[in-house]
Each structure stands twice: as C-alpha cells, then as structure tokens.
Amino acid sequence: MSSILDSRPALREVIEQVAEVTGYLWQKGWAERNGGNITVNITEFADTEMAALPALAPAQPIGKTLPNLRGKFFYVKGTGKRMRDLARQPMQNGSVIRICPDCASYEIIADLPVMPTSELPSHLALQDYLLGTGSTYKATLHTHPIELVAMSHIQRFLRPGEMTRVLWSMIPETLAFAPLGIGIVPYKLPGSVELADATLEQIKEHDVVLWEKHGTVAVGTDIMDAFDQTDVLCKAANIYMCARSMGSEPDGMTPEAMREVQQVFHLPTKRPC
Ligand code: 13P
Ligand code: ZN
C-alpha cells in the first residue's frame, strides 16, 4: 500500500520519531491498552500534492473553533489505537488530518480513514495556542504516567504549587528542565471541551499539565521533547515515592539550594516561544 510518507523522507523521520516515543510510553507502563494520544503539527511538509489530497471520510467537528488552525495539517493517534501497535505501524494506528476553512472541523486525508483520538479538542486547543503565540513547539503528548497520576489522588498535591515544589526539590535537574513546573486540572470528563479549556489555561504557565486522576499533557518542539518533559517530572515523582516507601517524608532540597539553581541557570519563569 502506498503511503503519504513514501515521497517525503523528512516527514517520515518525524513519524518515525513518534513511533520511537510510543515504544517508550509502552515500555514505561504509561500506555495501557489505548491509553494516551499524540498530535504533531506537520504543516511544514504539506506540499501542493499533499494539500490537494481528497478527504477519506466526511468532515468531523472538533468541538471548538480554533482560528489559528485553518488549513493546518496534523499527524494524530487514532482513537482506540494502542501505543505499542503505533510503534510498529504508525500510519495504521494514526492518520493525517487537515483543518477545514471553518476552523471548527477536520478531514482525514492519509493514509487510512483512522478516526483521531477522543482527546482531539485538548490537543488542537494547545496547537491553536502555540501557533497563536508564534511558538516553535509542534508536538502535544497525553499519557498516563503512573507516579504522577498516583500523586494526583492525594489532596495535598492538588493545592496550587504544592506538587511543583515537591517535585522540584527531589533532584536539581527537575528544576532545570521543568522550570515552569506542573499545572493541575481538577478531574473532568475525558475528551470533553471543558477539559480542553482547562488544559489550555494551565499550559500557558507550566511545562506539563496534570489531569487529576487521569494523566499528563505536555507540549514540545517535537514529540521527543514532549516525552522528556513528562519523563523529567515523573522521575522526580518516582524518587519521592521511593523515599516515602523507605519510611519517611523525604527532606527535599532546601529552598536556598533551589533558588541557587534558578539563579545560576537563569531559569525562565514564562513559557519560551
Ligand atoms: P484515545 O484512544 O481516544 O486516544 O483515548 C485514550 C485516552 O487516553 C483518553 O484520555
Ligand atoms: Zn487518557
């Protein structure tokens, strides 16, 4: 079967990176069954031939109107598809969509009519925001990292700033590589527009957003970057849990030590473009 990737080696490389990352998600235990989803903005690869591809199925509503997405192209994981299957066959477990001129619906154009993820409203709301701010970020990742989801079951960690403070204090790299910390979205129905709206508000101020009792959402320059953002925070959560399982609350780095890292490394307090 022919693929949209056949004559586009640069696009193939992007999709191969997605496949590599989905393998990691499965290996980490973050992607049970069809858990998690991905979108990558691939508009830069849309030549005239790709732009002229016909829709493989009737246009579908996004659930939101997103003005910065008109005519943009995205690779998206298919709903119900497994990350571990996508790692082997990315174009059978995901598809390429084009946003319609109304900015409120999309068409699937390649390779197969695989229906996009149920979390499309959240992914596309973030993509719309990134484009609107002139960001170079292209990828969005939702996954189910065990330790971070476990922490979201404890009320104390849902208080503003509390989870960020604890995670930052576990290991200096967390502060260095996730300087904006983790934002919390109180539990909402998966796939809902309310969840998308709340996620958008939190990503403006944080590196990663945690959906209470569900999973994380990260953005990145590419999908590897979005994975790394999640991994850095999940590693800190894992260290916290390991220390707790040794029998006591970990001390954590002192506020002075954390301030020193922030100052010496000139860490940003706002999302970089
Ligand atoms: P999809 O299979 O629709 O991508 O859903 C997985 C998921 O994690 C929902 O939050
Ligand atoms: Zn999920």
Image: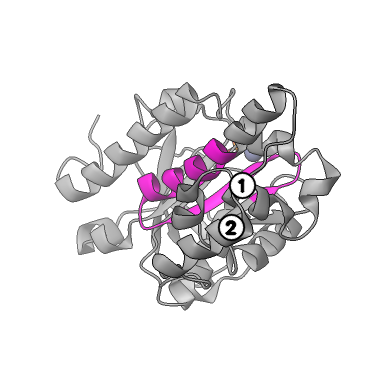
Residue type pointed to by label 1 = Leu
Please indicate, yes or no, whether residue 271 appears anywhere in the rendered image.
Answer: yes
Residue 66 falls left or right of residue 222: right
- Asked if residue 8 can be seen in this view, the reply is no
Q: Residues within 10 Å of mark 1 (few under 14, many from 20)?
A: many
Q: Is residue 141 above or below residue 22?
A: below
The residue lying toward the viewer, choosing from 185 and 74, is: 185
Q: Which mark is residue 178?
A: none
Disc 1 designates what residue?
167
Looking at the image, residue 236 sits to the left or right of residue 53; the answer is: right
**Label 1 within 8 A of ligand 2 by Cβ:** no
Q: Quadrant of the N terminus?
A: top left
Q: Measured from the top left, where is residue 26 in percent x and y? A: 48, 25
> How far across and down, in percent of the image, does residue 213 sit?
76, 39
Q: Quadrant of the C terminus?
A: bottom left
Give the residue drawn at x 66%, y 59%.
Answer: 199
Image x and y of residue 238, in percent: 59, 32
Q: Are marks 1 and 2 in contact (CB under 8 Å)?
A: yes
**What residue is disc 2 on?**
181
Q: Quadrant of residue 121?
A: bottom right
CA–CA distance in space, label 1 to label 2: 8 Å
What residue span does the magenta drawing correspond to? 210-236
